[in-house]
Image (spheres, rainbow, N blue to C red):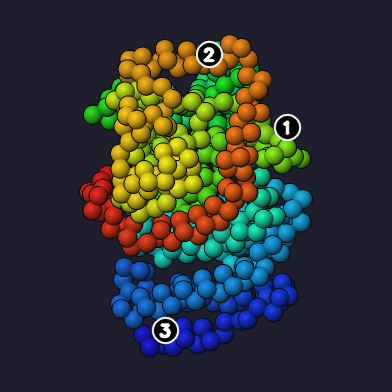
């Protein structure tokens, strides 16, 4: 074991300084980081390490992260220019981070390194994906590359555009874990993960964003509706549930990668709020810079975690009188998306802190709940209520909807404010995702060890 300890100490002593010359610094740091990854891989797997081996792993991870912060602090813009050809092309986050692994080896883990950790329990991972968080945090912290990345994530996906003719022909598409259907002037997007009460996980991410893209792209509709599908859980069999938030069982089992958070928050959740960007115009202040429609949510049973986060981006919320909302971040050990920025606009700072940091439940049919929900109806009246709201919002046309949405947004949350928030979120969520506290919270509050996948 002394050999490994000495090797780590010797490696740490070779940490390069930053000269300010990008390629020279990239080459020197790449050699250093790759050696660090090699030393980490040479150790026994995390659960099998003795005390000294665990300390060696912690030293490797800490030293590597510190050096990446310094390097990116000096060269984030240069790295981004390389990856986007001087910002002449848009690259989505989930592609960008792996292209960075090729352009500057060791800056972030390569795809195969992340894949090797993917099959492990969350508690058994070393957390090399924290390096992705450091990467995104530093890109987003710089206004020019950060805004460009936000723009890239607001563009409709190519897969979505490819499915548009199918939607035009069929009027509906079922993606398995999400679906879209035309109903008159509305595009209905359904959340579908019935076994897990319409929870969010790695299987839902792509399908939900595709459905959201199509709802916004479809020229035959004027408004979009978000609703949970029916579930087959014995307690709620045949009933609609809005969303139960992140799949905590999958989180505990290590089945949700860090990249999921960034892709989700900068992708379809931000598209709810801002619409779809176009390539040649700013998606914020400039008229015509977004393609958007009003969004209406129908909340049945509950909107937990991510489900509650969705509501903060909606234009109108109809909720059943027995439904409730929670943001159980304290019990999960993670940051609830952009709720820390958006929830205070609805309920004020005190209630927002109580909801996020103390687990306060907000029943929809209460004064606090009505700060988020526009209309409360009996559960049996939800179908009719949604149809009426769609009719009311479209009967006189929605020509001004995009303009009014944009006017609210520019004053409340301009894209640059979102960028700055995401710079903090990207780094902090990475550390939360791999924190021992997260595992302890899931075991204590979720009985995660006993849950079935």
Quarter holding the N terminus is bottom left
Q: Is residue 355 left or right of residue 218?
A: left
* Residue 128 shows in the view: yes
Which label sits on residue 101? none
Q: Which of the 4 image quarters holds residue 2?
A: bottom left
Q: Which of the 4 image quarters holds residue 185?
A: top right
Question: Relative to residue 184, is residue 404 depicted above or below?
Answer: below
x and y percent of residue 322 in the render? Answer: 29, 25
Q: Is residue 447 left or right of residue 376?
A: left
Query: How much space separates mark 3 and mark 2, taking CA atoms?
Result: 69 Å
Find numbered disc 3 in the image and state the secondary structure of the residue it sits on: helix
At 34% from the left and 39% from the top, the residue drawn is: 326
x and y percent of residue 160 in the render? Answer: 61, 33
At 31% from the left and 68% from the top, the residue drawn is: 47
Query: How much space separates mark 3 and mark 1, taking CA atoms?
Result: 59 Å
Pointers 3 and 1 in contact (C-beta within 8 Å): no
Pointers 1 and 2 in contact (C-beta within 8 Å): no
At 25% from the left and 54% from the top, the residue drawn is: 443
Find numbered disc 1 in the image and state the secondary structure of the residue it sits on: loop
Which label sits on residue 392? 2
Query: In the image shown, does 405 or 331 lie closer to the viewer?
Result: 405
The residue carrying mark 1 is 288
Question: Relative to residue 72, is residue 361 depicted above or below?
Answer: above
The residue carrying mark 3 is 4
Categorize mark 3 by other alpha carbons within 10 Å: few (<14), some (14-19), many (20+). some
* Residue 110 shows in the view: no
Question: Relative to residue 411, is residue 10 depicted above or below?
Answer: below
Q: Is residue 446 left or right of residue 19?
A: left
Find numbered disc 2 in the image and state the secondary structure of the residue it sits on: helix
x and y percent of residue 248 in the render? Answer: 34, 46
Q: Earlier in the sequence, mark 3 or mark 1?
A: 3
Depth check, mark 3 against mark 2: the one in front is: 2
């Amino acid at each position: 074991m002394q050999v490994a300890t000495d090797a780590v100490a010797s490696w740490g002593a070779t940490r390069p300084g930053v000269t300010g010359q990008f390629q020279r610094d990239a080459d020197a740091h790449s050699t250093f980081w790759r050696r660090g990854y090699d030393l980490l891989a040479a150790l026994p797997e995390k659960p099998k390490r003795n005390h000294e081996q665990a300390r060696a792993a912690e030293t490797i991870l800490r030293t590597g992260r510190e050096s990446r912060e310094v390097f990116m602090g000096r060269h984030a813009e240069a790295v981004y220019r390389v990856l986007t050809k001087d910002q002449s092309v848009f690259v989505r986050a989930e592609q960008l981070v792996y292209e960075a692994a090729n352009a500057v080896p060791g800056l972030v883990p390569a795809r195969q390194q992340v894949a090797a950790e993917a099959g492990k329990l969350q508690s058994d991972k070393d957390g090399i994906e924290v390096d992705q968080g450091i990467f995104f945090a530093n890109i987003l912290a710089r206004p020019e590359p950060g805004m460009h990345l936000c723009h890239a994530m607001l563009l409709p996906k190519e897969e979505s555009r490819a499915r548009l003719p199918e939607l035009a022909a069929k009027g509906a598409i079922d993606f398995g874990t999400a679906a879209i259907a035309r109903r008159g002037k509305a595009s209905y997007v359904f959340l579908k993960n019935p076994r897990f009460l319409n929870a969010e996980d790695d299987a839902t991410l792509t399908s939900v964003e595709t459905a959201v893209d199509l709802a916004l792209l479809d020229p035959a509709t004027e408004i979009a509706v978000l609703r949970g599908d029916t579930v087959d859980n014995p307690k709620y069999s045949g009933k609609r549930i809005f969303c139960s938030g992140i799949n905590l069982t999958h989180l505990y089992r290590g089945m949700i990668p860090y990249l999921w958070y960034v892709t989700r928050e900068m992708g379809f959740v931000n598209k709810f709020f801002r619409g779809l960007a176009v390539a040649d115009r700013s998606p914020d202040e400039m008229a015509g810079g977004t393609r958007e429609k009003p969004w209406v949510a129908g909340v049945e049973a509950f909107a937990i975690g991510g489900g509650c986060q969705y509501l903060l981006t909606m234009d109108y919320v109809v909720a059943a009188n027995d439904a409730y909302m929670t943001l159980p971040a304290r019990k999960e050990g993670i940051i609830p998306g952009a709720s820390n920025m958006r929830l205070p606009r609805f309920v004020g700072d005190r209630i927002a802190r109580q909801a996020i940091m103390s687990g306060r439940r907000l029943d929809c049919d209460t004064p606090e709940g009505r700060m988020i929900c526009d209309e409360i109806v009996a559960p049996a009246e939800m179908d009719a209520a949604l149809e009426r709201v769609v009719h009311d919002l479209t009967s006189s046309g929605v020509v001004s909807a995009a303009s009014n949405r944009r006017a609210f947004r520019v004053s409340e949350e301009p894209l640059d404010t979102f960028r700055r928030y995401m710079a903090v979120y990207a780094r902090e969520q990475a550390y939360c995702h791999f924190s021992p506290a997260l595992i302890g919270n899931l075991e204590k509050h979720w009985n995660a060890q006993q849950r079935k996948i």
